[in-house]
Image (tube, rainbow, N blue to C red):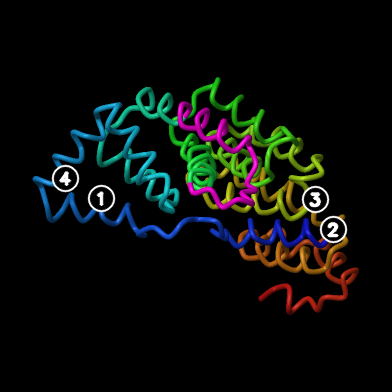
């Protein structure tokens, strides 16, 4: 149980342990090129629109550096690479990387190729969210629900699935994730909070997330988990913050109401 809590806290905190030492801010570099180096930007744009060269950029650079949601959106906006070009490249990288590490993370012999495959696999799964079609969504769900795969790949796939899901798909997926022993508890909470932050333009999705997470929280027994997620919800939903159910849960957890409302 302690191991599960530690692993899930890593998800909530968006920890990046395991990344090799690589330069940061590739999306900032893209924006800088656009504004300050027209020739360099045009050259890079041409390479990114060449599928063979783009694949090499993904393998050797893009997937080895942390790029957040805004960075991925920046990529598609600046370089105009279509989903139909990006998707097969990512799928091929996933196939190659997973054949090297067997969907595991362990690398007891310290083989550099395996370390690289681990990060490429995780980041390629995350990048799929920006170019997913129906088949890709099902692929992400299959990864998320496969308990033979390393937990972080599963959680990344679950997060990617929710990013490209519609409201009903999100509701169904959150129900499935919360029933899974690995994705449950803090793992599902962390995935849901990411989904909430990524759904800024979809109030229906946010409403579903608030409803499902608050319902789960009313049954939560772990005080640390409850306190974290209670603050998350109270800051985002006045209805939740003022609800009698929340006040009853705070009393049950012996948490002062004024603390929960910070």
Q: Which one is in front in this view, the residue at disc 1 or the one at disc 3?
A: 1
Q: Which residues are magenta?
A: 91-112
Count all numbered tags in the image, as a single digit.
4
Q: CA distance from mark 3 to mark 2?
A: 22 Å
- At numbered mark 1, what does the secondary structure look like: helix, strand or loop? helix
- At numbered mark 2, what does the secondary structure look like: helix, strand or loop? loop
Q: Is residue 94 magenta?
A: yes
Residue at 48 percent of width and 42 percent of height: 120
Q: Does the CB distance between marks 3 and 4 fall below 8 Å?
A: no
Q: CA distance from mark 4 to mark 1?
A: 8 Å
Name above or below for residue 134 compared with residue 13: above
Q: Which one is in front in this view, the residue at disc 1 or the one at disc 2?
A: 2
- The numbered mark, 4 or 1, whose residue comes first in the sequence reads 1
Image disc number at residue 1: 2
The image quadrant that residue 135 belongs to is top right
Mark 3 crowdedness (10 Å alpha carbons): few <14, some 14-19, many ≥20:
few
Q: Name the quadrant of the C terminus.
A: bottom right
Q: Name the quadrant of the N terminus.
A: bottom right
- At numbered mark 3, what does the secondary structure look like: helix, strand or loop? helix
Image disc number at residue 30: 1
Name above or below for residue 106 compared with residue 81: below
Residue at 16 percent of width and 45 percent of height: 41
Front-most of residues 141 and 77: 141
- The numbered mark, 1 or 3, whose residue comes first in the sequence reads 1
Q: Which one is in front in this view, the residue at disc 3 or the one at disc 2?
A: 2
Q: Which residue is mark 4?
A: 41
- The numbered mark, 1 or 2, whose residue comes first in the sequence reads 2
Front-most of residues 236 and 21: 21
Q: CA distance from mark 1 to mark 3?
A: 42 Å
């Amino acid at each position: 149980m302690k191991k599960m809590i530690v692993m899930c806290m890593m998800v909530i905190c968006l920890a990046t342990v395991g990344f090799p030492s690589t330069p940061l801010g590739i999306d900032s570099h893209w924006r800088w090129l656009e504004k300050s180096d027209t020739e360099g930007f045009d050259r890079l744009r041409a390479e990114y629109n060449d599928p063979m060269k783009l694949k090499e950029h993904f393998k050797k650079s893009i997937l080895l550096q942390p790029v957040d949601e805004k960075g991925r959106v920046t990529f598609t906006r600046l370089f105009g690479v279509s989903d139909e070009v990006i998707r097969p490249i990512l799928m091929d990288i996933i196939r190659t990387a997973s054949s090297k590490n067997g969907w595991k993370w362990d690398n007891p012999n310290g083989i550099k190729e395996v370390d690289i495959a681990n990060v490429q696999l995780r980041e390629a799964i995350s990048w799929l969210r920006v170019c997913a079609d129906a088949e890709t969504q099902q692929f992400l769900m299959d990864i998320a629900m496969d308990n033979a795969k390393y937990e972080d790949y599963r959680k990344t796939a679950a997060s990617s699935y929710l990013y490209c899901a519609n409201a009903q798909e999100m509701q169904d997926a959150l129900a499935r994730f919360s029933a899974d022993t690995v994705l449950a508890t803090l793992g599902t909470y962390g995935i849901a909070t990411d989904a909430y932050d990524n759904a800024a333009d979809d109030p229906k999705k946010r409403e579903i997330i608030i409803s499902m997470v608050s319902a789960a929280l009313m049954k939560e027994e772990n005080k640390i988990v409850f306190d974290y997620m209670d603050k998350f919800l109270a800051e985002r939903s006045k209805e939740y913050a003022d609800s009698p159910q929340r006040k009853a849960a705070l009393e049950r957890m012996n948490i002062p109401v004024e603390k929960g409302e910070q």
